[in-house]
Amino acid sequence: MKKKITALVLTLVMLLSVLTACGGGGEKGGSGDVEKIKIYLPTSGKTDDLDKVMEKVNAITREKIGVEVEFKVYQFGQWFQQYALFLSGTEDVDILANYGGYLNAVAQGAAYDLTDLMQQYGQDIIAKEGDYLKSGQVDGHQYAIPIYAGYAWNMGILYRKDVVEELHLEDMVANVKTIDDWGAVLEAVKAGKPEMTPFVTLNGSTAYTFNYGTWDDLGNCYGVLMDGGKTDEVVNLFATDEYKHMCEVMHDWYEKGYSSKDIQTQTDGFVVLTQNDAAFCTLGQTDFNTEFYQTTTCGKPIGTVMLGGGTPVARTYNNVTYTVMSNTKHAEACMKFLNLWFSDKEIGNLISYGIEGEHYVLNEDGLGEYPAGQDASTCGYHLGANISNTNRIIWCTEDPDYARKLDDSNTNAQKSAGLGFAFDPSTVTNEITALDNICTRYRTGLECGSMDPETVLPEFLNALKDAGIDKVIAEKQAQLDKFLGK
């Protein structure tokens, strides 16, 4: 009887060994058991050949990290409709992309604390991103991995270089240090190009002129760090001398005819007006890539003058991040995959652009482009670089020196005290709604110059105070102090 029991036990042990070898909880691969994970993300690109590309990706990931990945891709409209469902935990999601912030995932307990796994499996990400990983942290815990993007910028003047050359204003532009100095350039353009509006807003009437400032707005303008975040004191932007002076300058330009009388309601922004030879300059975000990007977009040669001392500032940024879901059963595999994706150029190229020779080719300059006879509408696969902006080839529409300039910009930037800070507005939502309504009434007119700040700005400040801006600032200061370990 004992022999029969022993034989039965041995049989069961052998059977379990066979099941484990065949997969059990995963498939046997070149480097051990293979774990399968799912990543959900949005895109405006083409995904017809997604399965074919994923076969190539998984052939690499199985060998290198013992992981297979399945991408679930949604068009942006559908994505934002489904995002709350993805966070709920009812979907089979292991890694979730977050566009516009990750705090909802953290607040709902949907984000896995990656702090320890980052140290164990995320060394390539740590080496690349360094301090910028703060853009995925809450209270010192790593809840999200931000893409490696351009963190550093400042408010600047964007202008038509060809117009400057035509009117021989090169020396005048070269001597511009502040926004006050720019008035002389506008006067010369108004006289030399009367058919052209010297100054227009960046996005028409759909956004405020000072959305991109020399301050760190800490997620919204209701409490900011002035002077590029050199100080950690949260103040009321609209009550600062700098804001008042900029409104005065805009009003002066408006009165002198440097901007059109309908600037407050003008729906077309700088790009459209520039394409139609109807505008000379605007104010906006300026960084290492602005001149190349705007020149390509506008179809005209665009130059920039960076304000705020000419130094780009690295500040709050958490626009595109990836969270590992708290209910995943494959947290280690997720971290291994993110680290490989964000560091391995072969994986980066495949996921961004597809299969070389089929979905993209390299031109004589080593830049990616669509194969002959294909374009964005006909190519079977093209997610684009913005999903990770990691190690990859440079696309033909980008600055060929983009990667180096990006690294230089992030490395040499002035770093705001609020770098990576993410404001949680949940305790002051009523106040923020009221403040939004007040800003709708006043900001556009003040910031485009059609309202006189001498009389209107005091009204604006009183209305903001009545709406609760001091309470929002106090809450933001308390959260920032906690973020800074005070």
Image (cartoon, helix red, strand yellow):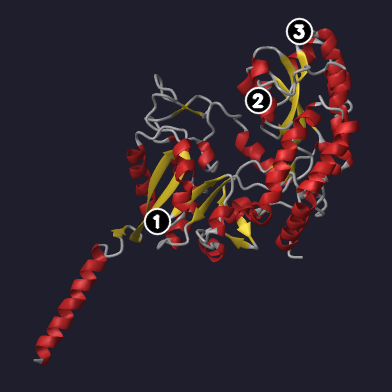
Seen in the image, is 51 located left or right of residue 344? Answer: left
Question: Marks 1 and 2, Cα distance to the nearest angstrom?
Answer: 42 Å
Question: Marks 2 and 3, Cα distance to the nearest angstrom?
Answer: 22 Å
- Residue 78 vertical placement versus 104 (above, below): above
Indicate which disc, 2 or 3, sits on the residue closer to the N terminus: 3
Q: Are the residues at dot 1 and dot 2 in contact (C-beta closer than 8 Å)?
A: no
Front residue of 433/176: it is 433
Q: Which of the two marks, 3 or 1, is nearer to us in this view?
A: 1
- Which amino acid, mark 2? Gln
Identify the residue shown where x is 77% and y is 16%.
260
Res 424 quadrant in image: bottom right
Secondary structure under the numbered disc 2 in the rendered image: helix
Q: Quadrant of the C terminus?
A: bottom right
Secondary structure under the numbered disc 3 in the rendered image: loop
Secondary structure under the numbered disc 1 in the rendered image: loop
- Which amino acid, mark 3? Glu
Seen in the image, is 388 located left or right of residue 312? Answer: left
Residue 130 x, y percent position in the rendering: 64, 54
How packed mark 3 is, by other alpha carbons closer than 10 Å (few <14, some 14-19, many 20 or more), is few
Q: Are the residues at dot 2 and dot 3 in contact (C-beta closer than 8 Å)?
A: no
Q: Give the number of the disc on residue 195.
A: 3
Residue 264 x, y percent position in the rendering: 74, 24
- Which amino acid, mark 1? Thr
Q: Give the number of the disc on residue 294.
A: 2
Indicate which disc, 3 or 1, sits on the residue closer to the N terminus: 1
